[in-house]
Structures are given as C-alpha cells and as structure tokens.
C-alpha cells in the first residue's frame, strides 16, 4: 500500500524555517522633488551668466565706439627735463585714444632718460593724462676714467657731457674694471662714500664746499682732501659717524695749534695721528 509521504513531517520542517516577516511597502522615490530645485537654480545661473556676457559685449562695444581723446597732458614742474622732452619720450599727442594708452610702456619710454628716478602716470577722464616724475639729484661726481654723476642712493646714473655742472665733490679710486669684477664690493664702497657726504652736510668745522675729493682705497678706505690747503683726513671704511664726530672735536684746535697741517689719520680706535707739512 503506497503512502503519500510529502506531508509527513511538514509541520516540523516549517517550524525549523525562518520566521515570517512583515513586508513593508516602500514608496517610490520622487525625483522631481530634488531635480526641480536644481534645474531652477541651474537655469537662473545660466541666465545670469548670459546676461553678464551680453552686458560685457555691450559695454565693450560702447567703449570702443565712444572716443575719449587726449585733450591735455599735465606734467609736474621739473628742473632737469623739460615738459616737451617728457611728452616726446612718452609719445603722446592730443587726440590719442585714452583707452588705448599703454601706461607701463609709456613709463618705460620716459625712464630711458637718466635724470628720471620715479614716474607716475594716470588717466583722468574724460581727457587728461597726468605725468608726475621725480628727478635724480647728483651728490658727487665719480671718476672712473670717465666722469659719472652719483646720486644719494649710490647709483651711477649719467656720464657727464659738455655743459654739465662740475661743482660737486669728486670721488676717485674706482675703475670701470672694479664695476665688472667686484660689483657688490664697489657698490658697498660707493654707499660708504654717500654716507660720508651725507654726514658731512651736518658738519660745521668743514662743509662740502671745502671738500675737493674723496679717495677710496681697498686697503685704507676713504680719505678726504680739502680745497684750501690740500690737507687730507683718513677715515677708513667703518664707524664713520664716530670718526667724524672726533674729527669735529679736534679740527679747529689742530688748525690753530698745528700750522702746516697736512694729514689727519682717524682710522684708529685709541689715537689720532697728525702729520705736518
């Protein structure tokens, strides 16, 4: 007799299986809720960019079509370079388009003149170009074989030409070769000479007009030569303010007490060496 064994033990098998779970129906994700704000923001951004682009194009066309001609060129007062020279160097003319001026290039052209130290150029709409310059002032004349003007920043800025003034202290002891072989050392020595001249402007016992020459020597430093009796004063290269102060204290006394004074050596810490002629 055959039996249907499919149902035998079925209840036990069900009991060993996983327990039934309650199924929760998930709501579909509403993408429109997220996409629509993003699309609106993107559309507004694109629209804004388009409007800005159109405004830029319109502005460019307007500025290109509306002329701003140069009507006047204003130059500050100068001593060395005339207004006509500056305007010629700048290459400016009335009627030039203000918007097309290249101020940096104009400044470089003006700076080619050795007397020019600093330049400021401005457009002042509707039609003015302002040029404001600072000129270099010679402090001394440096003898390098050729004569050069030296300014207070120790710049050798201009070779002397016929008609240039020579009534400045002369600095000697340098050569063109020094500038090429030891530019840093030469610059430092020239700065020391400028410092000495600046300090001497405050001296009462000796003025710059009394100085005929300042000589530089790599070993001995700076030596002052006077115009009246060709007396010399050796200062070395260090502690120039202190040495000049000592010089100021003794010079008048030495001139009266030591006739025929030829040389004063201050390049010592503890003494002063005086030589008579």
Image (tube, rainbow, N blue to C red):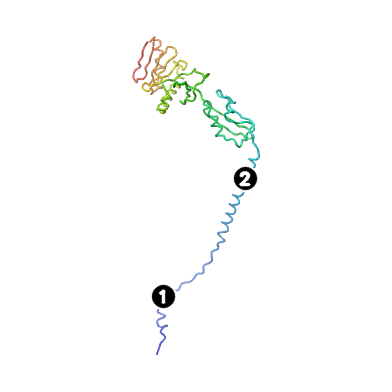
Cα distance between the residues tagged 2 and 1: 76 Å
Along the viewing direction, whichever of 251 and 50 lies nearer the viewer = 50
Determine whether 134 is above or below 213 in the image. below
- Asked which quadrant contains residue 190, the reply is top left
Residue visible at 62% across and 45% down in the picture: 57
Residue beneath label 2, please? Answer: 57
> Looking at the image, is mark 2 or mark 1 earlier in the sequence?
1
Residue 17 has which mark? 1
Q: Picture quarter containing residue 75?
A: top right
Q: Residue furthest left?
A: 270
Neighbours of disc 1 within 10 Å: few (<14), some (14-19), many (20+): few
Instruction: Quarter of the image for the C terminus: give it.
Output: top left
Q: Is residue 214 left or right of residue 271?
A: right
Residue 59's spot in the image, x, y percent? 63, 43
> From the viewer's perspective, is residue 20 above or below residue 62?
below
> Left or right of 254: which side holds 114?
right
- The answer to which of 46 and 86 lies nearer the viewer is 86
SS at mark 1?
Answer: loop
Looking at the picture, tell me which residue is in the foreground, 6 or 226. 226
Which of label 2 and label 1 is nearer to you?
2
Q: Position of residue 197 (x, y in %)?
A: 45, 21
Image coords of residue 12 (percent x, y): 40, 79
The front one of 225 and 9 is: 225
- Badge 2 density bin: few <14, some 14–19, many ≥20, Cα 10 Å: few
Taking the image as shown, residue 253 lies to the left or right of residue 161, namely left
């Amino acid at each position: 007799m055959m039996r249907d064994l499919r149902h035998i033990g079925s209840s036990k098998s069900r009991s060993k299986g996983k327990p039934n779970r309650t199924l929760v129906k998930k709501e579909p994700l509403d993408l429109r809720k997220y996409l629509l704000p993003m699309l609106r923001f993107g559309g507004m951004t694109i629209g804004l960019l388009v409007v800005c682009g159109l405004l830029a194009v319109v502005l460019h066309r307007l500025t290109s079509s509306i002329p701003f001609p140069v009507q006047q060129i204003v130059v500050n007062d100068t001593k060395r370079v005339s207004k006509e020279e500056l305007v010629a160097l700048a290459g400016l003319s009335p009627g030039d388009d203000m918007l097309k001026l290249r101020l940096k290039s104009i400044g470089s052209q003006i700076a080619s003149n050795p007397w020019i130290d600093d330049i400021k150029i401005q457009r002042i709409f509707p039609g003015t170009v302002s040029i404001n310059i600072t000129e270099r002032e010679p402090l001394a004349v440096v003898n390098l074989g050729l004569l050069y003007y030296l300014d207070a920043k120790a710049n050798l800025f201009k070779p002397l030409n016929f008609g240039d003034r020579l009534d400045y202290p002369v600095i000697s002891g340098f050569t063109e070769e020094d500038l090429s072989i030891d530019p840093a050392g030469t610059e430092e020595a020239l700065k020391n000479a400028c410092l000495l001249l600046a300090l001497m402007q405050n001296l009462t016992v000796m003025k710059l007009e009394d100085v005929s020459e300042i000589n530089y020597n790599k070993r001995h430093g700076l030596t002052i030569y006077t115009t009246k009796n060709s007396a010399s004063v050796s200062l070395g290269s260090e502690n120039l303010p202190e040495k000049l102060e000592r010089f100021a204290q003794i010079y008048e006394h030495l001139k009266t007490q030591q006739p025929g004074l030829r040389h004063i050596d201050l390049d010592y810490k503890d003494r002063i060496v005086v030589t008579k002629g």
